[in-house]
Amino acid sequence: MAIRKITRMRDYGVFRDFTWPQDLPEFGRYNLIYGWNGTGKTTLSRLFRHLEKQQNPTKGKLSVTIGDTDYSEEQFEMCSIPVRVFNRDFIAEAVFTTNGEVAPIFVIGERNVEKQKEVDKLKSQLDDEKDKRDKARAKLREVEGTLDRFCIDRAREIKNVLSSSPANRYNNYNKGDFRAKVDSFLKEESIDHYLLDDVAKDRRKRQHLATPKDRLSEITYTFPDLKSLYEEIRAILSRTVVSSVIATLRDDPDLASWVRDGLSKHKDRKAQTCLFCTQPLPPQRLKELEAHFSDEYERFISEIDRKINDIENLIRGLDNLTLPNKAEFYDDLSSDFIRASDTFNQVRGVVVSALQKLKGALSQKKEAVFESSDFTEEIPEYDSNVLEVINAVIRKHNTTCDEFSARVSKAREELENDAVASSLDEYRKLMEAVAAAQEKARKAESSVSSLERKIGTLEREIIEHQEPAERLNEDLQKYLGHSELRLDVEETGYRITRAGEIASGLSEGERTAIALLYFLRSLEDRSFDLEHGVVVLDDPVSSLDANALFSAFGFIRERTQNAGQLFILTHNFTFFRQVRNWFHHLKGQNKKDVNLRPARFFMLDCSIEQDGRCAKLQWLDPLLEEYESEYHYLFAYIYRTAMGSRQTELQQNYVLPNIARRLLEAFLAFRQPQKAGELWQKVKSLNFDECKKVRILRFLHTHSHHGEIGEPEHDLSVLSEAQAVLKDLLNLMRSEDEEHFLAMVSLVTAGNQNENETN
């Protein structure tokens, strides 16, 4: 059984939405995956580590095809394929642990053969019990799912029946509400009183579906006191103004009003001549007019005007007073309201008519202020409590509203109780099935735990990890060339020592060497079947120099070549080339059908999308298989991009500054070996167009990120010039070493060196 493919990776690390392409061959026995830092190698290794530990990932959506079975992220715990993963997590958990101990590697001692046989027998039983446990877990999930769907369906039925507009609490009714009601019913001795017959149920449904009316506000208004108002107006009408009266003005009110306004204008403007005829104003005439329109006259006129204004306000208040619409009342109250409103409108007409008469009498008084007058109109009679009658109808309506809501709420609750009570028997059966499945799962779990404890006890008795420790120390001596570093046996593992003392301050190279050699030796652990197992190495030569790298490769090849399935992930091109050459010489690797070859070659590519970096697994670029150095690959990538006729999307250009920088650094390393320091120090000495040199360096410095593909954070206009800048870079290389440049172009274009040369 082998891992055939990773069918799906969504929202898992930098794999936003990866689906295994139909044209991508499945994994083989030997698999080499090349990818720069940040392209998803560690994420892939952690996926394999989840399989190793039979742990379900907590994030992302995953699907892995193992043999003929697809395992989703929720089923990793059920996957029993033996896997061993070397990555940073392995180093932290098994090698450089918080307590300073390295986990032991177990082998079988000659004196413990019988105990080992017993362990093997118990492990066989354990496999059976685990199978029973897994089936019990699956059955438990099944019955729990059935119960959950039952509650969801019943809650949906109740919601569909009792939802309404305006909204009520049943509009958001869910399985939690249903289960809470069921649980409360289970505590009662009898639930028969909750069940409704067909007649009662139909009546409750009609009450629930009835349309409620809104509450109405009472009318707050007080009719004017006509009696007091009449007395006040009569008093005003009986009064007169005492002054030197001009008969013509007294007998002609219109003329008097006109003269009064004119006199006011002449006073205000201090006019000496008539504003109408421009003749001189006789002083005596002015005195006569002022005596006629005395201060007492003006005050009386102002008082009348104020009272007229007060009456007009009362009239407007009555005219603007609005009553509710009869449609706003319940049907049984609408007739009472209509009668009360008709009475009110009659009273309003009477009062308004009386007020208008008072206003008219005052207007007439303004024209006869020098004479006393009588007001003989009788105070009309009207029902001043008519608004109270209307408000009484409104109060009845509001009381009905309150009672209506209560009736509707009660009807809905009784319908809910009936639906829940009707479902109680089936709910009990489902709960009993869940309880039985839980008990069966608990017993199966207990049986597995008991066997694991027995096996653990026996294994502790037969553990002898002295021999693998000695082998590890031999490996370390061969690898490092000295025996200063050792792994000393402890009761529960190994402790790393230097010259007999606990080792501290290990270099990165030493840490990598110990971790890698320990991992490779752990493949001999009796708990792992190498020939049927899966071995995964994620960047196993990180932080190693060239000499150590080749030594590490030798150990890796020796210890993993018999693995049932091997995955090697790396960003180191030198190590990549070593593994690639190893795989190329495997028996059957030259077969035309890639599916019949033992080794498969893949690469990880990471692009910048709208939501960030997005990785994908794809077939290895032919350039990486074709050339013997990374320099060849970098040159071919830049040349084909620069000479391409199709404009690439902007987001695809993010990788170009990084590749271009590494190409230029490699080129100048052998063209300018005598110059050290920053890239600019090497470039500025070249005999090439200064503006183009600055443009190239700006492109490289702004968007390259020390070997990793960074996030976009600079001027995007620079990236939009990528193709043109790359042509400048190629021209710079040609200018510096044309023979070398043309040889590289010839290699890339397979002999047609002039087809895409730079202009």
Image (spheres, helix red, strand yellow):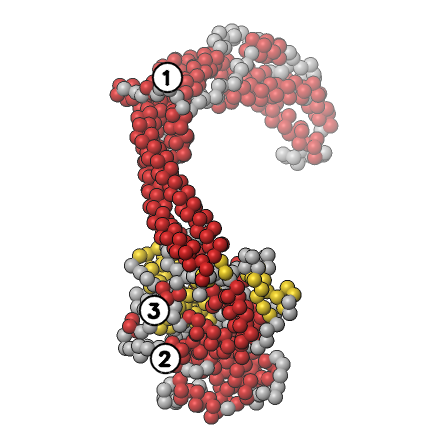
- Residue 682 visible in image: yes
- For label 2, the crowd category at 10 Å Cα-Cα, with few meaning under 14, some 14 to 19 and many 20 or more, is few
The picture places residue 465, in percent across and down from the top left corner, at 51, 62
Q: Secondary structure at mark 3?
A: loop
**241 left or right of 733 in image:** right
Q: Is residue 51 left or right of residue 228?
A: left
Alpha-carbon span between mark 1 and mark 2 = 100 Å
Q: Mark 1 or mark 2: name the one nearer the start of the chain.
A: 1
Tell me what residue is drawn at x 36 percent, y 72 percent.
600
Q: Earlier in the sequence, mark 1 or mark 3?
A: 3
Which residue is found at the position 57% from the left and 77% from the top? 481
Residue 585: mark in rendering: 2
Q: Are marks 1 and 2 in contact (CB under 8 Å)?
A: no
Measured as percent of width and height from the top left, residue 188 is found at 39, 21
Q: Nearer the viewer, residue 245 or 670?
A: 670
Assess disc 3: are there few (<14), some (14-19) or many (≥20) residues with their C-alpha within 10 Å of its C-alpha. Answer: many
Quadrant showing the C terminus: bottom left
- Which of the labelled discs sits on residue 28, or is there none? 3
Q: Kindly identify which numbered label has been placed on residue 334.
A: 1
* Residue in front for this viewpoint, 362 or 127: 127
Q: Amino acid at mark 3?
A: Gly
In front: label 1 or label 2: 2
